[in-house]
Image (spheres, rainbow, N blue to C red):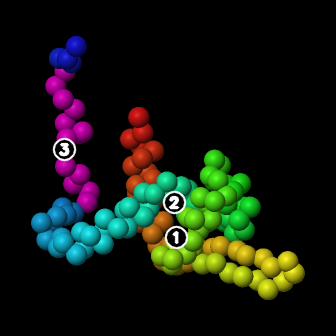
């Protein structure tokens, strides 16, 4: 049954706290670059792996513990992908046995900083 109340104006009112964005002046090359970035971050488990890195995971077992449900194979794949995009740095420590650590690069940390508003939006609009 339809509501007889008037629509909530705050839900449709523009956000005056942020400047208007001129979407018409985003060229095709920038759009394609943006699409590649969104698709990378949107891959299954990628955001969780990046968040684990930002929360201090360094060794493979740390990532496994912080990203529950991910398989070893998929975690390895995501770490390699993030490394290839220079979002995670793989460090080999030549000890016996060899230790391998993964840590966020500045580029990865800057990506997480720009994604933080999306985290807040998601928490606010879940449902």
- Categorize mark 1 by other alpha carbons within 10 Å: few (<14), some (14-19), many (20+): some
At horizontal 19% and vertical 41% (from top left) the residue drawn is 12
Disc 3 element: loop
Query: Which residue has dot 1 on it?
Result: 81
Where does residue 83 sit, x and y in percent of width and height?
Answer: 55, 75
Q: Up-down: is 93 above or below 34?
A: below
Whether the residues at callouts 1 and 2 have beta carbons within 8 Å, the answer is yes
> Could you tell which of marks 2 and 3 lies nearer the N-terminus?
3
**Residue sitting nearer the eye, 79 or 27:** 79
User: In the rendered image, which residue does mark 3 sit on?
Assistant: 13
- The residue at the point 19 percent across, 49 percent down is 14
In the drawing, does residue 48 fall left or right of residue 68?
left
Disc 2, SS? helix
* Residue at figure coordinates x 80%, y 79% from the top left: 98
Q: Which of marks 1 and 3 is in front?
A: 1
Q: What stretch is highlighted in magenta?
A: 5-18
Which residue matches tag 2?
46
Are there few (<14), some (14-19), or many (20+) residues within 10 Å of tag 2? some
Q: Residue at position x 56%, y 64% from top?
A: 78
**SS assignment for the magenta stretch, majority:** loop
């Amino acid at each position: 049954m339809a509501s007889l109340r008037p629509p909530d104006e705050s839900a449709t009112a523009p956000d005056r706290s942020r400047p208007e964005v001129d979407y018409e002046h985003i060229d095709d090359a920038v759009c394609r670059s943006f699409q590649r970035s969104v698709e990378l971050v949107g891959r299954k488990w990628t955001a969780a792996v990046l968040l684990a890195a930002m929360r201090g995971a360094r060794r493979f077992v740390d990532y496994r513990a912080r990203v529950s449900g991910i398989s070893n194979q998929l975690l390895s794949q995501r770490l390699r992908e993030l490394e290839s995009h220079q979002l995670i740095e793989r460090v080999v420590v030549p000890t016996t046995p060899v230790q391998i650590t993964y840590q966020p690069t500045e580029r990865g940390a800057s990506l997480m900083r720009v994604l933080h508003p999306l985290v807040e939006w998601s928490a606010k609009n879940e449902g």
